[in-house]
Amino acid sequence: MSKWVYYFGDGGKELKNLLGGKGANLSEMTKLGLPIPSGFTITCECCIEYQKLDRKWPAGLREQFDKNILELQKVSGKTFGSETNPLLLSVRSGSRISMPGMMDTVLNLGLNETIVKMFAKSKGARFAYDAYRRFITMFSDVVMNIDRMKFEHVMDAMKDKKGLKSDTDLSATDLEELCASFLHIYKTETGEDFPQDAYSQLERSVNAVFDSWNNDRAVRYRNMNRIPHDIGTAVNVQEMVFGNMGDDCATGVAFTRNPSTGENKRYGEFLANAQGEDVVAGIRTPLTIETMKNTFPKCAKELYDIFTQLEDHYSDMQDIEFTIEKNKLFILQTRNGKRTAGASVKMAVDMVNEGRIDIKTALMRLEPAKIDSLLHKQIDPKALKSATPLGTGLPASPGAAVGQIVFSGPAAEAAKDKKLKAILVRLETSPEDIQGMAAAEGILTARGGMTSHAAVVARGMNVCCVAGAAEIKVNEAAGTLTVNGQVFKEGDFISLDGNTGRFYAGKLPVVDPDMSGDFDTVLKWCESIATTEVHANCDTPHDARVAKSFGAKGIGLCRTEHMFFAEDRINIVREMIIADDTPARIKALDKLLPFQRSDFHGLLGEMSGMPVIIRLIDPPLHEFLPHEEKDQHILAKVLNIPVSAIKAKVESLHEFNPMLGFRGCRLGVVYPEINAMQVRAIFEASLALQKEGKDPRPEIEVPLVGNIKEFKLIKNLIKKIAKETGAEGKVHYKVGTMIEIPRAALKADELARDGAEFMSFGTNDLTQMTCGFSRDDAGAFLKDYVAKGIYDVDPFQAIDQAGVGRLMRLCVGLARSVNPDIDIGICGEHGGEPESVMFCHLIGLNNVSCSPYRVPIARLAAAQAVVRFGPSQKQTPAKIFAKI
């Protein structure tokens, strides 16, 4: 029979996949002798089995569950369901991967009408009815799906009527009256009385936590963070301890280091006379952990000692939840704390310097996708000196955000769909806002502390966040933000400084971040470990300089057509396209030659000594022509030709599917003079650079090849011009091809044998041609495909390893079977996506190429690939074919 239930201490941190992070760590801390309320964990495997059995408990769970309840009663000295000495429980979720706020919890379980009256006499009426109203609300929300705002509105109305500001101002009589109102809401919504049997409450709550694994917000969170849907959540059943029993009680959340900055300083917040939900929900403004020594001196010292013990034990920054009941400290949870990208870098470097961890461990703690935030801009310090803040909140998640105000998650999503930058302004955020928070440029809330939902989730997503801005008034229904009498409406611009917590009216300028210090140390670690080189996609010397500053070892893709759109040459390009014969086309191309020569001189000169892959013209020619009639009239005047000639050319170049039409090497085959001009410009620029003492290394790439005969035609043209210009034997150059058509991958051995000196996967086109998705139109259904699990992730965002990736493996195996040393890389947008970079390492690619600002991300992913999979890069064809 399967073991579904583990009592705390029976397992440990090594069983994280089975017990979930929370359960594994509760067991671990129990074995360490820390003050942990007793309890047990129902495994993640049980959750999956429960789902398979259509929400039924698997065989053996009932017996194991009852046995552990008896053990918990024995340890606690209390009896579950007893009316004289009752054991109250918490029921909490806990997957192996932390998903803060996404799944459900029920606290104070076991209360009923009889027990609450007994508690009122023995422990105080205010505490008893405060706990009961919380339990009714949570059970109604989590188990019965009753909107918790129905209860919140009743409580807010009572506070307004009595002129009270805080929940703690409510008297015992007020709370007893609220409980009666809450029970009435429950019966109205469900048609039944609130359950009085403790075992019924418990079983239904366990089921609800299992069910919450598949609630909308949890599924969205997993989709956004690429967390598997089949790992399930554990359920932790634990004896309740109470932080809301009076002024000698408290609850809080603390970190062993600052999760925003990475500073090695204890950090956290607590509330006296409260339960945990009050801290994370931001309903009351908490106190800093440093002030605990004034109100709870003994517990504060014990807590700080536990901070040290846990960080030493886990060798990582810990996020700890605690409760103080009658001046006695209890630890409810510890986990590796979520942190901002900047904090993660600082902690990694500090902990290596402290001797806690080695470099490989430090690198694996960094999330490449989150490091992206360090590469983005910050508010210009010069502008900050003269800017007057509207107000100040808590710097919950650093960075800068400048955008237009929206007041709901859906509005933030809609803004992103329109390519607009939105600042999500809320009274407070809730787990239901998860998708809108991800879509927003930044988040501003009126309520909440540094450990509120908004703060924790924003840090996890690397979204700039200012929380707990007490001076703002948010009217979400009216769509207004009021700050000190100044009213802002949806669409107005504001700027957030997540480093200081200040926010400003209008749009402040932003600047590039400083990449020195700890981040530079991390990049040096990557350099010493990675075996896959990182190149950049660059079309200008400026982009090349940026890429080099981030450590790029070459240019993996120069899109020459981007140069054609420059204002000083676009009309020459159009003249070339409209030309009716070869002489007229060559005449226009001769005008373009100096421009292209200058382009390549700048790019190759900037990257002296490094490979620069230059892709010959790729897009269909109609993209360069004006399609609006007014623009056609302007061009007609410039070229001194009839408008009818332009319209006729536009019509003749029209294609039903341009991505599969007259583009890429097909242009070079039909109009070789276009490629000839570009190649001549490359060689003339290279020869000029050599005279200047530089070392240009052009690698000329033939795009969209599917047939070896196409490639040979253009390669012969390249060799011919190399001889004509005198570059042959002087300039170090290569000729290769982009692999973006499935046929090219299938014929890679032929290409490698008959002249391709390098290959580079163009995964955007390769994905759309392999999957049969239009990269421009697939967005209409790919979100649903990912949500339904047909694809784990959008294949245009990360390589479809099972399909497109298999074709890539085949290509590498075929090419290396005839030329073991052929250089193979990737230059599509996937080249900077961390999981795709690791896949490229696994299949033996020499390099990946991405946009300049993603180079550090790719470098980190390349180093992590070595740590995860070993340094061996070039695999034999036999090994590659064995994996296909």
Image: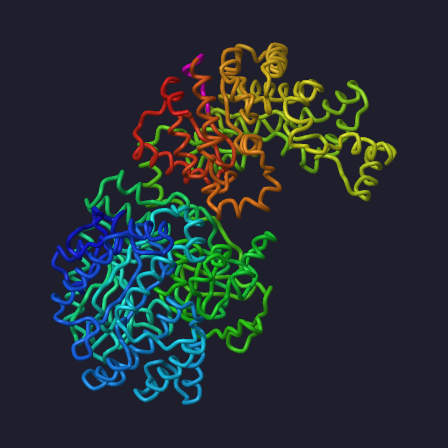
Q: Position of residue 679 (x, y in %)?
A: 62, 20
Of the pair 710 and 63, the residue shown nearer to us:
63
Q: Is residue 554 above or below residue 368?
A: above
**Outermost residue toward the front in this view:** 59
Q: Position of residue 650 (x, y in %)?
A: 78, 33
Give the left or right position of residue 286, taking residue 736 as reference.
left
Residue at the (47%, 58%) spot, across then down: 437
Task: Tell me if residue 23 can be seen.
Answer: yes
Q: Position of residue 529 (x, y in %)?
A: 31, 32
Task: Tell me if residue 262 can be seen.
Answer: no
Residue 11 colored in magenta in the image? no
Q: Is residue 658 above or below residue 719?
A: below
Q: Position of residue 833 (x, y in %)?
A: 45, 39
**Which quadrant holds residue 323?**
bottom left
Q: Is residue 90 above or below residue 365?
A: below
Residue at the (46%, 37%) spot, across then down: 832
Q: Which residues are magenta?
A: 818-824
Give the left or right position of residue 704, taking residue 340 as reference.
right
Q: Is residue 495 above or below residue 295?
A: above
